[in-house]
């Protein structure tokens, strides 16, 4: 996926989340090393590069957590409301395009190797 398409999707995620400010959302974040954090909270603010949620922690303590729109794009953060994923179509579209990339890359690699073999040795 080219950078222009990624930027367009990130802008679309930002615009969509702007409509959900003040609403309760469920967050599932992949924190790495097989650690997945699931929490529920209220979307407090949206900024150009990130959004802030107020989530409930242990013993009812509220904490503010920020996430980047790119994390939604890459699938590291998933948001849902009432059991429905908010950004499933973006992730599915990206995965479909990623499956096509290796086939194209292999074809390009083979042609470049053939070109190298046809060059005279010095």
Image (spheres, grey):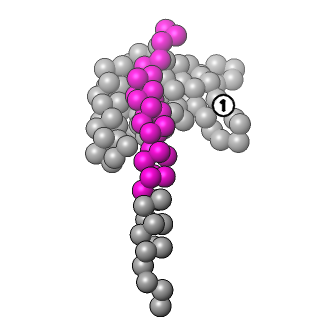
> SS for tag 1?
strand
Q: Position of residue 78 (x, y in %)?
A: 51, 26
> Main SS type for the magenta part?
helix
Nearer the observer, 17 or 1: 1
Relative to 56, say whether 46 is above or below: below
- Residue 47 percent coordinates (x, y): 34, 37
* Residue underneath mark 1: 36
* Res 97 visible: yes
Q: Is residue 112 above or below residue 103?
A: below
* Residue under the image location 58 percent in, 31 percent down: 29
- Residue drawn at (48%, 66%) of the image: 113
Q: How many marks?
A: 1
Judge by depth and name the residue closer to the eye, 116 or 60. 116
- Residue 67 on image: x %, y %: 48, 37
Classify 10 Å Cα crowding around label 1: few (below 14), some (14-19), many (20 and above): few
In this rendering, would 59 be left or right of 53?
Answer: right
Q: Quadrant of residue 60?
A: top right
Residue at (43, 19) in percent of width and height: 86
Q: Which residues are magenta?
A: 82-108
Q: Is residue 43 at all visible to an observer of this figure?
A: no
Residue 26 image offset from top left, x and y in percent: 53, 19
Q: Residue furthest top?
A: 82
Q: Say which quarter of the image contains residue 88.
A: top left
Q: Residue furthest bottom?
A: 122
């Amino acid at each position: 996926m080219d950078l222009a398409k990624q930027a367009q999707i990130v802008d679309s995620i930002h615009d969509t989340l702007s409509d959900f400010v003040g609403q309760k959302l469920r967050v599932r974040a992949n924190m790495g090393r097989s650690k997945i954090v699931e929490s529920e909270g209220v979307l407090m603010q949206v900024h150009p590069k990130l959004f802030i949620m107020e989530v409930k922690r242990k013993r009812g303590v509220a904490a503010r957590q920020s996430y980047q729109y790119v994390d939604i794009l890459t699938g590291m953060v998933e948001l849902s409301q009432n059991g429905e994923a908010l950004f499933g179509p973006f992730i599915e579209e990206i995965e479909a395009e990623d499956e096509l990339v290796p086939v194209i890359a292999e074809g390009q690699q083979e042609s470049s190797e053939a070109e190298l073999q046809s060059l005279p040795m010095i």
